[in-house]
Image (cartoon, rainbow, N blue to C red):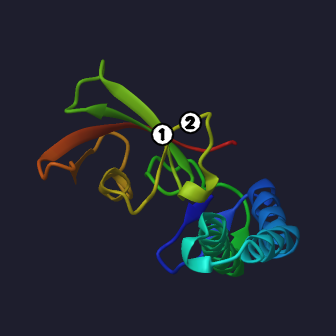
Amino acid sequence: MTQTSDNVTWLTQEAYDQLKAELEYLSGPARTEIATKIAAAREEGDLRENGGYHAAKEEQGKQELRVRQLTQLLENAKVGEAPAATGVVAPGMVVTIAFDGDVDDTMEFLLASREYASSDIETYSPQSPLGSGVNGKKIGEDAQYELPNGKKAMVRILEAKPYSG
């Protein structure tokens, strides 16, 4: 999955289908399940001291937030192929970097939205400090980004290839 600056999110067909299935579940069966939990907890008595009720309401809120996120994401989604191998870092690419130019201290990650994160490869959002630092850079170029402590770090782009899933 890749994101562009105009809020269009490019998805593989597989990613689109997975997110659509999640939305359908959360909008249908999951809503019924949480409504049943809330109703059961409400019958237990005083709502001010009813931990089960409050937990179910919190779960419902998180679920509705996810429904809104998925709805917006899928409304702006375009199903297509990964970006071409142009040697320029872009969302949807697997990027290999060297820290401070040290080719022995490297890291490989997918530059993509967290929605498409997998356990196979580390994923960094194009909006993250590292992601925004490397986005648009060419192989061989240096990129700078800000660390959580406020210091700057330098990386060199070693490779940028389309993610094949």
79 left or right of 48 in image? right
What label sits on residue 109 in the rendered view?
1
Looking at the image, is 51 positioned above or below residue 97?
below
State the image coordinates of residue 75 (x, y, percent, origin top left). Answer: 70, 81
Q: Position of residue 4 (x, y in %)?
A: 52, 71
Give the structural element (helix, strand or loop) at label 2: loop
Q: Residue at x 45, y 34 (%)?
A: 108
Please give the name of the residue rendered at 80% of the width and 59% of the height, measured from the top-left corner.
Answer: 13
- Mark 2 — residue? 121
Q: Are marks 1 and 2 in contact (CB under 8 Å)?
A: yes
Q: Relative to 119, does residue 78 appear above or below in the rendering?
A: below
Residue situated furthest front in the rendering: 45
Quarter of the figure that contains the N terminus: bottom right
Identified at 57% across, 53% down, the residue is: 92
Given residues 30 and 147, the one toward you in this image is 30
Few, some or many residues within 10 Å of mark 1 (<14, 14–19, 20+): some
User: For the view shown, which residue lies furthest in the top direction?
Assistant: 104
Where, quadrant-wise, is the C terminus in this rendering? Answer: top right
* Residue 145 placement (x, y as % from top left): 23, 52
Q: Which mark is residue 47?
A: none
Q: Horizontal placement of 73 versus 106: left or right?
A: right
**In terms of depth relative to the viewer, which is nearer, 140 or 96?**
96
Indicate the amino acid at tag 2.
Ile
- Which image quadrant is residue 3 in? bottom right
* Amino acid at pointer 1: Phe
Label 2 crowd (10 A; few <14 / some 14-19 / many >=20): few
Corner quadrant of residue 49: bottom right
Query: In the rendered image, which quarter is residue 9 located in?
Result: bottom right
